[in-house]
Image (cartoon, helix red, strand yellow):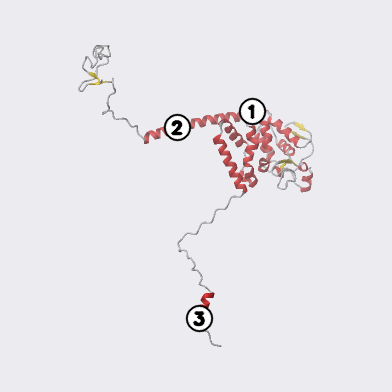
Amino acid sequence: MAPKDPAMQTSGNAAANPPAAPIATMPPNAPAPKPAPPQPNVIQKTFRAEALARIQRAVLTDCGFVERLVVFWSNHFCISAAKGGLARMWAGSFEREAIRPHVLGRFADMLKAVEQHPAMLFFLDNQQSLGPDSRAGINRKRGLNENLAREIMELHTLGVGGGYTQDDVTSLSRVITGWTFAGRQGQLGAPGSFVFNANAHEPGAQRVLGKSYSAGGVEQGEAVLSDIARHPSTAARDASWRQRARAHQRRRRERERVAARARHKARARLEPARRPDRSQAVPRRGAWRLADGERPPDASDPNALCGEREGGASQSGCVRRFCRRVD
């Protein structure tokens, strides 16, 4: 068998294995391409949508006074979106569902809606509070979490020095055990809604602020909140809140007036007043002016008056010759 021609062998290999495309090389000093920004997840999308809706509602509202009340009470019953993903999910709905419907209503209704909202329960860890003698507390060997009870008495209603003691805080924390929210599985209710877990509730009667409350379920805690909302210390603090709100509004208006005056002075310094040039102005018809080379009359001289102004016969000039009329 004859040996193959080397030229034919080379051409055959080239046809079977075509040359690879040249590899694009980057300049040594070229910046690295920026990675694509990560897409927002459902928590971020919900938080941004709620924030946008809140701003649009405040800007487009017809009654700004109501929006100020919403901001005031949202600041009073505040939560933190930095608590976690659930707090960011519920931050917008907390204001929309618990505060906004009650700004023109009763304080007791707003207090109940706030303390039973999942955002407040999650923010103050009340879902972790278990009655020591409850079924869940015995099985899990866990006890009370007083965060929500202390927040209700110290910040939301009575205030420091409002007449409550540590025993009242502990009793209130027992009363509101079992106040929680449903999880994703929805075993206790619709996911993300307020539910009462009877297995975590501390059984028995409780005494709060000198009043005894009989054993019960969620209605026991609601009765305590209703009485705290009508407590004299809460009423006095509510009056002080309103006074501070009015004082804040007066200070804000004064700051706006001061800022407006400062802007006006700055504008006057940057843009000096442009006075019109009256040297070449044409006198309007019927105007009076001094004649060339004449001095103005003495105002104290009763004779230094224009004849026409005195009702004289001259219609084209002054009888004293110190001024003339432009016709």
Which picture quadrant has residue 201? top right
- Farthest left residue? 293
Q: Residue 29, position in %: x, y?
A: 45, 62
Instruction: Using the image, tell me which numbered label, if any, was put on residue 236.
Output: 1
Q: Earlier in the sequence, mark 3 or mark 1?
A: 3
Which picture quadrant has residue 303? top left
Name the residue type under label 1: Ala
Find disc 3 in the rendering and name its residue.
8
Which residue appears at 64% of the width and 40% of the height?
A: 93
Q: Quadrant of the C terminus?
A: top left
Which residue appears at 77% of the width and 32% of the height?
A: 212
Q: Residue 1, position in %: x, y?
A: 56, 88
Name the residue type under label 2: Ala
Q: Residue 130, position in %: x, y?
A: 74, 43
The answer to whether 83 appears left or right of 138 in the picture is left
Mark 2 element type:
helix
Q: CA distance from mark 3 to mark 1?
A: 106 Å
